[in-house]
Image (cartoon, rainbow, N blue to C red):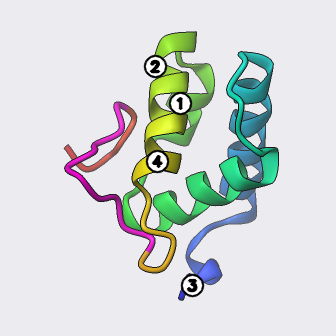
Amino acid sequence: MTDWSKISDIDMATATRIAKRAIELGVELDYVDICMAIEKCHISNPLDLYGLLEANASDLIHDVTGIYRHLNWGTDELEDCFIPKYSKKQ
């Protein structure tokens, strides 16, 4: 179960901005699902959210779609050896 107390309001707001940008760039995923995937991932695998927000289009799309596809929604962990480019865990 996700411990939502581990993510700040500022980080949640940044995740929503990332999701909005991803949709504007043509990512065909649900906006709310993108937000939740980024937030859940950030809790278990800290991301450079500000870097991701400002990333070039291909890096942002890579990380957003990769997080969405490889996130275990039950454990909030990334699977299949996927590491986002904007992960703080390298």
Residue denoted by label 2? 59
Regarding mark 3 in the picture, which secondary structure is present there?
A: loop
Side of 83 where 59 appears, left or right: right
Residue 61 quadrant: top right
Instruction: Give the amino acid type for the residue marked by disc 1 in the picture.
Output: Leu
Q: Are marks 3 and 4 in contact (CB under 8 Å)?
A: no
**In the image, is residue 78 part of the stretch drawn in magenta?**
yes
The front one of 6 and 19 is 19
Q: Is residue 21 magenta?
A: no
Name the residue that disc number 4 marks.
69
- Residue under circle 3? 3
* Residue 81 relative to residue 51: left or right: left
User: How busy is the neighbourhood of tag 1: few (under 14 within 10 Å), some, or many (20 plus)?
Assistant: many
Q: Which residues are magenta?
A: 76-85
Earlier sequence position, callout 1 versus callout 3:
3
Instruction: Provide the residue designation for mark 1.
Output: 52
Of marks 3 and 4, the one in the foreground: 4
Judge whether residue 56 can be spotted in this image: no
- What residue is shown at x 45% (from left), y 71% (from top)? 76
For the residues marked 1 and 2, what is the alpha-carbon distance in whole angstroms? 8 Å
Q: Earlier in the sequence, mark 4 or mark 2?
A: 2
Contact between labelled residues 3 and 2, with CB atoms less than 8 Å apart? no
Could you give the CA–CA distance between mark 2 and mark 3, rounded to whole angstroms?
Answer: 27 Å
